[in-house]
Image (cartoon, rainbow, N blue to C red):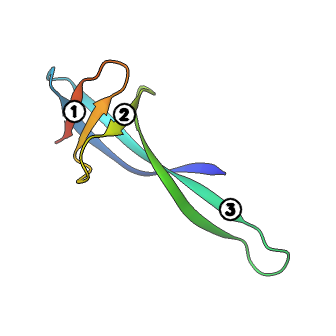
Amino acid sequence: MTNRLVESFQAKGTSGTIYTVQIFEKVIEHKPISGPPSTLGGSKEAILSDGRHVNWVDSGNDTFQILDNDEVIKRV
């Protein structure tokens, strides 16, 4: 299983700091005995460009929370 970058964007924190959020999707590779190999997208995770993890706060994918300091950031 590998990860692929599916989206990257800027987000502004409550502190005024601008962050780069990267969305990665797990890629599941299927290699059958016969026929061509295929891939299937799996779960997604959000990570800042400095490696820190963030959680989605809303279902609209515009608000996140940085896990190590609880700062809320919003897509700009």
For the residues carrying marks 2 and 3, which lies nearer the camera in this image? 2
Please state if 60 lies on the left or on the right of 49 as rendered. left
Amino acid at pointer 3 = Glu
Looking at the image, the residue that sits furthest to the bottom is 35
* Sequence-wise first label, 2 or 3: 3
Q: Which residue is drawn at 22% across and 47% down?
A: 62
Q: In which quarter of the image is the C terminus?
A: top left
Distance in Å between CA atoms under marks 2 and 3? 26 Å
Q: Which mark is residue 54?
A: 2
- Which amino acid, by three-letter code, is at mark 2? Val
> Mark 2 touching mark 1, by CB under 8 A?
yes
Q: Is mark 3 on a helix, strand or loop?
A: strand
- Residue 9, percent from left and from top: 29, 44
N-terminal label among 3 and 1? 3
Q: Where in the figure is residue 71, as x and y percent of width and height? A: 24, 24
Task: Give the crowd class for mark 2: few <14, some 14-19, many >=20 residues within 10 Å.
Answer: many
The residue located at (35%, 37%) in the rendering is 55
Q: Residues within 10 Å of mark 1 (few under 14, many from 20)?
A: many
Q: In this orientation, which residue lies closer to the viewer: 68 or 74? A: 68
Decide if residue 37 is on the left or right side of residue 9. right
Q: Position of residue 19 (x, y in %)?
A: 28, 30
SS of the residue at dot 2? strand
Tag of residue 29: 3
**Which numbered disc, 2 or 1, marks the residue that appears first in the sequence?**
2
The Cα atoms of the two marked residues, 2 and 1, are separated by: 9 Å
Q: Residue 33: x and y, percent?
A: 85, 75
3D distance between C-alphas at marks 3 and 1: 33 Å
Q: Please give the residue where the numbered disc 1 appears in the rendered image.
A: 73
Q: What amino acid is found at the position of numbered circle 1 in the picture?
A: Ile
Q: Say which element carries label 1.
A: strand
